[in-house]
Amino acid sequence: MNNRCLQILVVFISSTFLLCCKKDSASSPLPIFKTYTIFKGKNYADGFDSTHIVFIKTNDLKFIAKFDSSAIYSTFISSNQIDVNKLYGFSDNNSDHHLFSARMGWAWYNNTLNLFGYTYNNGVRSILNLGVYSIGTNLNCRIQTDTATKSYYFTVNGKTKSMPRAAKTSAGSGYRLYPYFGGDEPAPHTVTIQISE
């Protein structure tokens, strides 16, 4: 093989290698998850109790949640099994979250992981089942506010349901709400939840 052929071969192999290794700019980056740990006998995720206040103003809160087998639990009092644990969301109307808020919630019920829309409007709590989902998978979640329809829109993996919104602010305005176990009971064992916003 002469030098000219060798040069062409080297250029061809190098070009092919670079094309194969080139990162697709259209592909989404992998989510970076933060792990929230709720220790046995506790309600709040470690380090995220009621004193951990981060203000937020948004019409569209998007996040990915991922549960592992620690989401499988039995409550001490069987009637508490359907109690909704809190996943992620925000207080609204620049108020306390027991007056105005929108969150997603979850519960291990009937041997399945159920997600919920969970709101407070003028101190009145409402809960809406958003469906059954799988442990160990990425759950693409979204909470939107719409002043025109006076609604919250809760979306999980492309499926959307709405709930009324009585807040008067133009966007969801308040502070972030982090994972919380309960309900009436604290976590019966340590629970870990991963969230990427």
Image: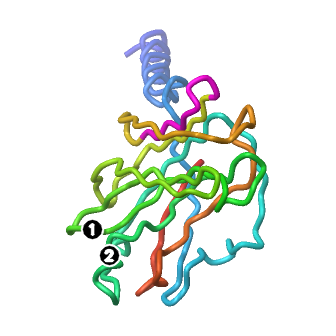
Residue at (45% x, 50% y) in the render: 117
Residue 144: image quadrant is top right
In the image: residue 172, left or right of residue 70: right
From the viewer's side, name the closer residue of 73 and 153.
153
Residue at (46% x, 84% y) in the render: 185
Bounds of the magenta span?
Answer: 147-155
Q: Is residue 37 above or below residue 63?
A: below
| Image marks 1 and 2: residues in contact by CB distance under 8 Å | yes
Which element is circle 2 on?
A: helix
Residue 123 rendering spot, x and y as whole percentages: 62, 58
Q: Is residue 22 above or below residue 165?
A: above
Position of the N terminus by quadrant: top left
Residue 107 rendering spot, x and y as whole percentages: 36, 66
Spatial separation of the CA atoms under disc 1 and disc 2? 6 Å
Disc on res. 81? 2
Disc on res. 109? 1
Residue 98 rendering spot, x and y as whole percentages: 64, 62
Disc on res. 165? none
Which element is circle 1 on?
A: strand
Residue at (48% x, 29% y) in the render: 27
Residue at (40% x, 48% y) in the render: 139
Residue 155: image quadrant is top left
From the viewer's side, name the closer residue of 167 and 132.
167
- Magenta stretch holds residue 163: no
Q: Which amino acid lies under the numbered mark 2 shown in the image of this protein?
A: Gln
